[in-house]
Amino acid sequence: MRICIAKTVLLAALAWLALSACTTLQTTLQTTLGNGETVALNQPLWQEGWSGWTPVQPAFAQDEPRLNRNVMGTAMRVAGMDFAEGVGVAGDALLVFDLAGNAAAFDMLAGVDDASTNARDVARISVVVDGRERWVEERVRGQVPAHCTVPLTDAHQLRIQITAPTNVYTDLALARVTGNAGLRAALLQARSDMQDFVFQPQRALGGVACLQNGSVVYPVQHKQYGACIGISNAQLKVVIAPNHAARIITVAYATTDVSALADMRVSLHPTERTIKRPAVPSADDTPWQWRLESNGTLRFLSPPDYVHGVRWSKTVFLLGNLPAARVTTMGRNCVQHDISWSIGTEVAGAPGARMVADNAHARVTLVTPGAALWVCVDEPAHGYFPYGGRRVLLPTNAVPPRATLLSEITALKPGRHLAHVVYLLPQPPGTEPFSFDACAPTYTAVTNRCARYHELPAEPTGRAIDN
């Protein structure tokens, strides 16, 4: 009897808290904010938002958080209490909000919905502010919702992250952000800016253009990647797919179409830091903006990835009339807290290609019956690399063969960059396979190195540079 009475009292208290959470929060902050604004988060104001599992129907809401319903589309109910307002998800889930320093506090109730088919496993619900976990609770079905209140003064990013099996349904009820006047408009603008990048229409090169360094750019139609951009000089041609994260898909001599390369893209490392996410558009496969610069550089820019705190830029530059291209990838810290990453350049070989990795000198070679290509990281140096200090990761038995060349792990303050420079050097036809000697003169010329190219330089790579 006592247990039943205690439970009844607790449920009543939580119900009262649910009804008064918004008013209490607003009253408490009224003195400091004056005419502030309280924004309910039961609407798509997030920059990124997904649910790890959703039912097959409705199709338009696949992987999307449900508004004012649990993930099954029915009324939200936690421990016997009904909530008319909130967000419902299932499994691993994520909501990211760009606050831009306009918010003062965050408030919500979080628990596992009574409709969840899993009564034993735990939903871990955490609130991360500018990269720091400020609140975390674990809940199972039947437990009363946990009350979260987190200060957000001067905060730039709010991240609500849920870790749970897919058959655990989590409800975020009465979620509120209180802050300065204009907070809702700022959240809408941040979401709109993100959507402009993620869902921008495809853009194709209008025609042939001659660049200042003697290179020529021209449109290329690829059967797999669609509208692409080709750039070539007297000896080399490179094809890039801007609508697929600026992947480099061809590197060949100007007189042939045979390329040992199938795909070259970038990723962040170590991979265990990344957050598991569904197959939705991200900076890894969306269209990247591009432009031609007066010095002959072809530059690409990704949408910002606020989950990992990085925005990519990539430049492709053909070096004079030499058979060499320099690809510079930069990851810019686009959030307001310190992060640290290593850039990985992942190289995949064409069908039938063989791949040999040289970890000591941070380079790989791809060889097909008609072509050979060296991919070399500039200044393979000492320093802290992920995965036990390895500079090149070469998985065994991968088809097609692939390898990842890594930069050093570099700490980045807000607004700073991490650079990763890679040189693409096709091996001259008729020369001995797997011999870097054939490419050494070109490599020495384009990197301005001494002839003793096997020696390591004195300074490490992965330097952070200012804007």
Image (tube, rainbow, N blue to C red):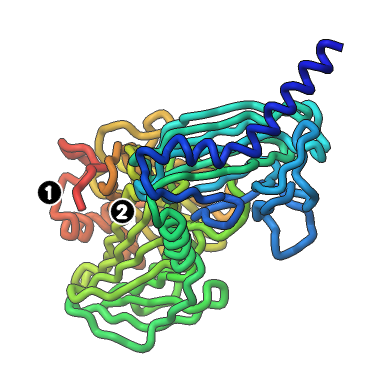
Q: Nearer the viewer, residue 101 or 268?
A: 101
Q: Is residue 256 above or below residue 461?
A: below
Q: Amino acid at mark 2?
A: Met
Specify few, some or many for label 1: CA neighbours under 10 Å numbering under 14, 14-19, or 20 or more: few
Observer able to see residue 364: no
Image position of 38 with respect to 200: above or below: above
Outermost residue on the right side: it is 1
Disc 2 designates what residue?
330
What residue sits right under mark 1 in the picture? 450
Q: Position of residue 178 (x, y in %)?
A: 46, 44
Q: Is residue 230 left or right of residue 48?
A: left
Residue 360 versus residue 305 in the image, above or below: above
- Which residue is rendered at x = 30% and y = 38% of the image? 410
Q: Amino acid at mark 1?
A: Cys
Q: Residue furthest bottom?
A: 207
Relative image position of residue 338 (x, y in whole percent): 32, 37
**Residue 435 visible in the picture:** yes
Name the residue located 34 percent from the left edge and 63 percent from the top edge: 426
Among the two numbered marks 1 and 2 on one chain, the one whose residue lies closer to the N terminus: 2
At 35% from the left and 67% from the top, the residue drawn is: 429
Q: Would you say 203 lies left or right of 65 here?
A: left
Tell me the mark number nearer the camera, choosing from 1 and 2: 2
Q: Nearer the viewer, residue 9 or 353?
A: 9
Q: Is residue 104 left or right of residue 422?
A: right
Residue at the image point whose x is 36% and y is 45% from the top: 34
Q: Name the secondary structure under disc 2.
A: strand
> Gap in Å between the C-alphas at discs 1 and 2?
26 Å
Specify the quadrant of the image occupied by residue 352. bottom right
The front one of 327 and 93 is 93
| Residue 440 sits in quarter | bottom left
Image location (x, y in percent) of residue 272: 51, 36
